[in-house]
Image (cartoon, coloured by chain):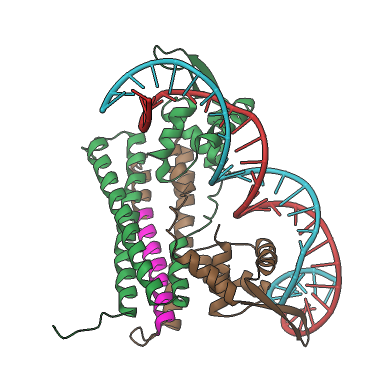
Chain colours: A green, B brown, C cyan, D red
DNA sequence: TTCTGCATGTAATCAGTTACATGATTAG
DNA sequence: CTAATCATGTAACTGATTACATGCAGAA
């Protein structure tokens, strides 16, 4: 129950239209909170009804009009209330872990298919890490010269980087373990 | 859409009643897939209707009867089909990261409250790590003597351990960052 | 007698996903 | 002429959570 709060943080950092928010949820915020545009528009309506946000129509030349939302003082107060409440335990859903344990009940070709899939998955995470590192160089070139907001953004990004590095190391461990189950047989050269 | 598959893996590893499954989802499987007993009973019904599982009534002395479920060949086939499908990208939901970025919009007492909350959260993860390490010593005392199923269980557990270690290191980084925002002022001794 | 553990569920609600829909502009 | 980007939504459905409910056994 905190898509509202993620949106409030994003709007306090910078007011935005629903469309712009959806793009942020594909990029920076999406690192730790995902949401589709459908969901965002629905929640924005609810937040407007609760007077947590207020919108302003902006006409654009050559582009459709948009409605730019900002957090109201009431919205900021709601965020602060939530910030001071205990952090809820995360609901863990790690599909790959289920598959790894499940592959004990498949045969060698099935295990080989999982190896290929883990390799693909690993490449995705390698790309994600590269993207984070590029973002870090771009947005935080001088980490000693940051204001409070930037320091906090940076430490969250460092969390993403640490997570991706951990995942990559673990996936190497997984690949080695899977390959050990079906060791390649040695053949005499023909 | 894979609570079904997590249950199939668990039942293939060892048949169980709904209640026992719910406890597993609080312990070992819960490391990478959470589910409440209400959800489990509902899904078990659906799986029975799909003939993925079959149940046997077991009368117990001094305890209520229970229904022990096993995966059928059809269930195993459904699992294998799912195993060979691509892994879906995970939906990330990291509430603490939202709070860290959000605390830029709170005052010093609010930041102090978050420090306290992060410390509590860190203690939880330290306990989780200790539990994993104890489980590793108990269940995998001799890591070179494992069959396929145990090797896979072990590599998943190592993932949990790596995750918890990464989280603890990051939380230390977070705490240092939060404390730097409000450096303690030096006072003359009265 | 109160609490914990064993054992199973229903009902209501909420959050999130998927599918569908529209319409303009700009770049290839 | 097609695809991508900008911009906003509705409707239907599925998955997950929360609240409520029952009942027995054994321990404190």
Q: Position of residue A110 (x, y in %)?
A: 41, 71
Res B87 quadrant in image: bottom left
Find out whether residue B123 is within the magenta segment.
no
Q: Quadrant of the N terminus of chain B?
A: bottom right
Q: Whole-percent x and y of residue B111?
A: 45, 41
Q: Is residue B100 above or below residue A20?
A: below
Answer left or right for A99 relative to B22: left
A17 or A102: nearer the eye? A102
Task: Pick whichever, B4 or A75, lies toward us.
Answer: B4
Give the residue at x 30% y 60%: A168
Q: Which residues are magenta?
A: B147-171
The residue at the point 49 percent across, 50 percent down is B117
Exactly how many numbered labels are in the figure?
0
Res A65 visible: no
Q: Position of residue A112 (x, y in %)?
A: 35, 71
Q: Main secondary structure of the magenta part?
A: helix
Task: Say which quarter of the image contains residue A175.
Answer: bottom left
Residue depicted at 50% across the width and 58% down the height: A93
Where does the C terminus of chain B fall, quadrant-wise? top left
Name the residue located 41 percent from the left edge and 35 percent from the top edge: A24
Any part of residue B146 in sight: yes
Percent position (x, y) of residue A125? 32, 54
Q: Is residue A145 left or right of residue B49?
A: left
Please tell me whether residue B148 belongs to the stretch shown in magenta.
yes
| Residue furthest out toward the left | A189
Question: Is B108 placed above or below B63 here?
Answer: above
């Amino acid at each position: 129950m905190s898509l509202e709060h993620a949106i409030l943080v994003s709007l306090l950092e910078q007011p935005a239209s629903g469309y712009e928010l959806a793009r942020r949820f594909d990029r920076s915020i999406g690192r730790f909170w995902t949401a589709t545009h459908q969901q965002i528009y629905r929640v924005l309506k609810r937040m407007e009804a609760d007077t947590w946000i207020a919108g302003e129509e902006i006409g654009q030349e050559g582009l459709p009009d948009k409605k730019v939302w900002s957090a109201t003082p009431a919205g900021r107060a709601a965020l602060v209330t939530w910030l001071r409440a205990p952090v809820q335990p995360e609901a863990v859903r790690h599909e790959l872990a289920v598959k790894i344990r499940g592959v004990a009940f498949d045969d060698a070709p099935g295990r080989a298919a999982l190896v290929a899939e883990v390799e693909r998955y690993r490449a995705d995470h390698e790309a994600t890490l590269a993207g984070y590192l590029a973002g870090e160089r771009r947005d935080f070139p001088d980490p000693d010269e940051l204001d409070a907001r930037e320091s906090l953004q940076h430490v969250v990004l460092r969390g993403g980087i640490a997570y991706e590095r951990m995942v990559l190391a673990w996936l190497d461990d997984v690949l080695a373990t899977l390959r050990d189950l079906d060791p390649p047989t040695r053949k005499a050269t023909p």
